[in-house]
Image (cartoon, rainbow, N blue to C red):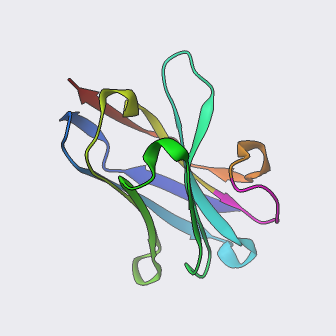
Amino acid sequence: QVQLVESGGGLVQAGDSLRLSCEFSGRTVSIIAMGWFRQGPGKERDFVAAITWSGDKTWYGESVKGRFTISKDHARNTLILQMISLKPEDTAVYYCAARSSLGKVANAREYDYWGQGAQVTVSS
């Protein structure tokens, strides 16, 4: 099993920056990639960003390209999502996820482990 715990959510104003962290632990030897997804009120869970376990490749959803950056800090067992130029439409619960199989990084159903979520609210 792999445990994921998000932190860093909060209430910010449009244009502000925010950093989300996801501390991972457990049997991470099986993990090949990690990602961030978000789910707004009444919406489906959408892909935000993903990164390979080695950190050598990243992917981003179209709506966050150029504003969000995903990275991994192996020394601290932490996945990071740095968000800048936040918009009200970025308001959502953000989930950290990990996967142990190849496939489509944007497909939430292919991820095996999930964190509990962190609320991000951006006011206009």
111 relative position to 42: left or right: right
Q: How many marks?
A: 0
User: For the point 27% across and 30% down, which residue is it?
Assistant: 122
Query: Which of the 4 image quarters holds residue 35?
Result: bottom right
Q: Main secondary structure of the magenta part?
A: loop
Residue 69, position as x, y percentages in the image = 40, 61
- Is 115 contained in the magenta span? no
Q: Quadrant of the N terminus?
A: bottom right
Q: Quadrant of the C terminus?
A: top left
Query: Which of the 4 image quarters holds residue 45?
Result: top right
Residue 46, position as x, y percentages in the image = 59, 37
User: For the point 53% across and 65% down, which residue is it?
Assistant: 24
Above-or-below relation of 64 to 78: above
21 relative position to 11: left or right: right
Could one spot residue 79 in this view of the protein? no
Could one spot residue 9 in this view of the protein? yes
User: Which residues lie in the magenta part?
Assistant: 98-105
Residue 23, position as x, y percentages in the image = 46, 63
Above-or-below relation of 59 to 39: below
- Out of 33 and 25, give the one closest to the viewer: 33
19 relative position to 29: left or right: left
User: For the point 57% across and 81% down, which residue is it?
Assistant: 56
Q: Residue furthest top?
A: 42
56 relative position to 88: left or right: right
Residue 3, position as x, y percentages in the image = 59, 59
